[in-house]
Image: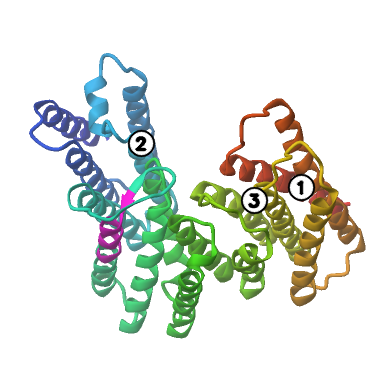
Amino acid sequence: MILVFIGFIMFFLLLNKLEKSETLNSELIRKILHIGSGFGGLALPFIFEKKNSVIILGVIFLMVLISIRLIKNRIAGFRKVLETKNRKTFGDIYFIISILGLWIVSSENKIMYSLPLIILMFSDAFAALIGEFYSKYKFDTGFGTKSVEGSVTFFLTTYFICINFFLFFSNIKSINIVLVSLLLSVLAMILEMISWNGLDNLFVPFFVYLFLKLNLYLAAGELTYKFGVIIILLTIIILNRKKTTLTKVAQTASLFFLYIVMIIGGIKWGVPPLIMYLGYYHFTPKVKGQVKDSLKGLLTIAFTTSMWLALSIIMNKDKMFLIYIFSFSLFFGIINLIRDNAGNIYRETFRMSFLMGSIFKAAVFFLVNYFILSRILDFKMLAGIAVLISGGIFIYETSMKIFYIFEKENELSGESKVFLTSGIVFTCSMLLLGIGML
C-alpha cells in the first residue's frame, strides 16, 4: 500500500512539473493522468489479495484529491493537473470512486473489472484529445461543448477494445462478440455524450459493468433483438427530428432513455414516453420562435418518470405502472399549458378554457395508455389520478400567475418551467403512491 501510494505521488509530482514548465498541453497532461491512473487500477488485482487494502488506499487517494481542491493557495499548481482553465471538473474524484466501486463488486472477475476501466482509460482519453485538437463539428450539450469527431472516436475505440478483449479473454461466439461490442459501443458513446462535469468517469464504467453483467452471455437472438430496438428508435428519432423542440443532444438522450426503458420494462413501458415524444409537438400549441428544449429538462423528466420503473422491480408492478402513466400524462398536460402560455400576453389572467383543455389532454393521454396497456381496476388509484391530474395542472398555473404578479417584466426560462413541472409531477406521484399504499 505504501509503495503504491508513493508511486502515485511521484507520478503526480512529475505531471505537476510538466504543467509548470508548459512542456505539454494541459488537456494532454490530464489525459496522461487519466490513463496512468487507469493502469494503476488495472494492476490492483495482481498486487492485492484483500479487498480492504484497496478500499483503504482508495479512501486515502480521495482525501488527497479533495484536499488539493480545498487548499487553494499552497497547492494551486497541483489543481492545474486536475483541471484546465476552461473546464472545471471532478473527473479525477469520480475516477477513483469508479475504481473502488468496480473493485468491490467485481475484483474476483478480471473481465468484469478490467474492461470498464480500459474503455474509460482509452476511449474517453482519445475522444477528448481528438475533440481538443482536431474537431471541426462541435455541439452544445447544455453543460458544455463536445464534438462529433470526439464521439466517433469514442465509439471506434470502444468497439476496437471490446472486439479484441472478447477474442482474447472470453469464450463467447464470434457473432455474439460483434453484437455485444456494437451494442456496448453505441450505448457507451451516447452516455459519454450526455455526461457532464466529468461524470462520464462514473457513468461509463458502471454502465459497462452492468451491461456485461446482463448481456455478455445472452443468446445471439436476444442480442439481435436489442440491437434492432436501437435501430428502430434511431430511425424514429431521425424521422421525427424536425417535429420536436429538443436539441440534438436531448434527442440523443431520448434514444438512450427509450432504449433503457424498453429493454428493462419491455414495450409496454416504452409506449408512454414514445407517445409523448412523438405527440407533444403535434397535439400542443405551436410556439413562434421556439427555443430548443435542453438536455437538462429532458433529464429531469426522465428521472421523475423512470423511478417508477425502477421501483416496479421491488414493489407492485401494476400500481407502479399506473403511477408511471400518470406521470407522463401530467407532464403532457402541463407542457400543453406551457406552450399555450408562451403566446399569452395576459400572463396574470386565468384562462379557464385553456386550463380545462390541458386537463382534458392529460386525461386523454392517460386513458389511451390505460386502455391499451393496463386496464388495472384499482378504483381508489383511478380516483386519485383524476384528482391529481386536475390538481397538478391547477397548481402549476397558479404558481406561474403568482410569479408574474411579482415579476411583471421578467420571463421564467424554459428550463425553470420544466424543473417546476418536474417538482409538481414528483409530488403528485408520491401522493398517488400514498393512495395506492392505503
Q: Is residue 126 magenta?
A: no
Q: Position of residue 115 (x, y in %)?
A: 31, 60
Which residue, given by chain and number where applicable, does mark 2 sit on?
89
Q: Position of residue 49 (x, y in %)?
A: 32, 48
User: Which residue type does callout 1 highlight?
Assistant: Met
Question: Which structural element holds mark 3?
Answer: helix
Q: Quadrant of residue 36?
A: top left
Q: Position of residue 86 (x, y in %)?
A: 29, 34
Q: Are marks 3 and 2 in contact (CB under 8 Å)?
A: no
**For residue 9, above or below residue 54:** above
Nearer to the camera, 95 or 129: 129
**For residue 77, above or below residue 272:** above
Sort mark 1 into few (<14), some (14-19) or many (20+) by Cα contacts within 10 Å: few
**For residue 274, above or below residue 358:** below
Question: Which structural element holds mark 2?
Answer: loop
User: Which residue type does callout 2 highlight?
Assistant: Thr
CA distance separating discs 2 and 1: 34 Å
Sort mark 3 into few (<14), some (14-19) or many (20+) by Cα contacts within 10 Å: many
Q: Is residue 148 magenta?
A: yes
| First along the sequence among labels 3 and 2 | 2
Residue sitting at x 51%, y 56%: 246
Where residue 120 is drawn, which disc sits there? Answer: none
Left/right placement of residue 113 relative to residue 318 reads left
The magenta span reads 146-156
User: Which residue type does callout 3 highlight?
Assistant: Thr
Which residue, given by chain and number where applicable, does mark 1 sit on?
430
**For residue 74, above or below residue 236:** above
CA distance separating discs 3 and 1: 11 Å
Left/right placement of residue 23 relative to residue 95 reads left
Which image quadrant: the N terminus? top left
